Image (tube, rainbow, N blue to C red):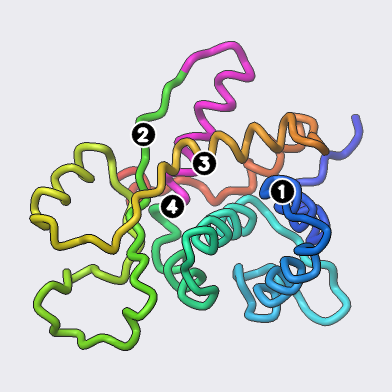
Amino acid sequence: MAHVPAYLGSRDVEAFFRRFLGISEDGSKAFTGRMKHLIRQKFPEGVNTGHGVPARYYADQFFQVVVVVELWQWGVPPARATRLVTDAWPALRTSVRSIWREVDAGEHGAVIKAEPIFWRVPVEALAYLTAEDRPWRQPDADNLIVLTPRERDEREQLAGGREWRVAYIEADKLLRQVFEFLKFGTDPLPFAKIASLMNTLPPETDDDRAT
């Protein structure tokens, strides 16, 4: 049986995003520059393996980039996007696992429907210039938070309309589209390779299950 690589190369990742996002030829150079900048900034951790060594993206690294690129789409500056994702990654990884279980079960004829997932993202671009003690600032005003629909509604009610510069990304829909595009996009991967990639996620811990 042929060996199935459990990682994606930097060219694979860049090509995936170009096609997934529909990057034009004119925009390709700028997008490549952004992706290379991530590697130079040692994001995600473990991808920049040294001069002359090809970058390898395992599931953890690939999906961290998925979230960062989505934050770019919402206008979050690159440096802030990587910090938000790094700080929130244990909870974000749980989102990825949840949708992967659904996708994997479906591939084997079973039905598992994941609950909707929302990523609450502060999109206040000038937040870094504002005072920490401003009256409407919430304690976690500059954190990316993973919420269920009920938690989102409760948070909205608690905030009383004071969180007007916040986006709620429908993460379950985004992640399903990513897996769908990996399977059936313009350059589809065999499901065995996708499964091999996903098997590189670190083992789930008790803390992850409580997230």
For image coordinates 58% across by 54% down, the residue present is: 66
Q: CA distance from mark 1 to mark 2?
A: 26 Å
Image x and y of residue 175, in percent:
53, 40
Image x and y of residue 104, in percent:
59, 26
- Horizontal side of 73 relative to 98 (left or right) equals right
Q: Amino acid at mark 1?
A: Gly
Q: Mark 4 vs mark 2: which is more N-terminal?
A: 4
Query: What is the number of the mark on residue 174?
Result: 3
Q: Amino acid at mark 4?
A: Leu
Q: CA distance from mark 4 to mark 1?
A: 25 Å
Query: What is the number of the mark on residue 22?
Result: 1
> Secondary structure beneath disc 1?
loop
Please rate how many residues cluster around mark 2, counting C-alpha atoms within 10 Å: few if below 14, some from 14 to 19, many from 20. some
Q: Nearer the viewer, mark 4 or mark 1?
A: 1
Q: How many marks?
A: 4
Q: Is residue 86 above or below residue 147?
A: below
Q: CA distance from mark 4 to mark 2?
A: 13 Å
Q: Nearer the viewer, mark 3 or mark 4?
A: 3
For image coordinates 45% across by 59% down, the residue present is: 89
- Horizontal side of 52 relative to 131 (left or right) equals right
**Residue range (magenta):** 92-111
> Secondary structure beneath disc 4?
helix
Q: Mark 3 vs mark 4: which is more N-terminal?
A: 4
Quadrant of residue 140 in the image? Answer: bottom left
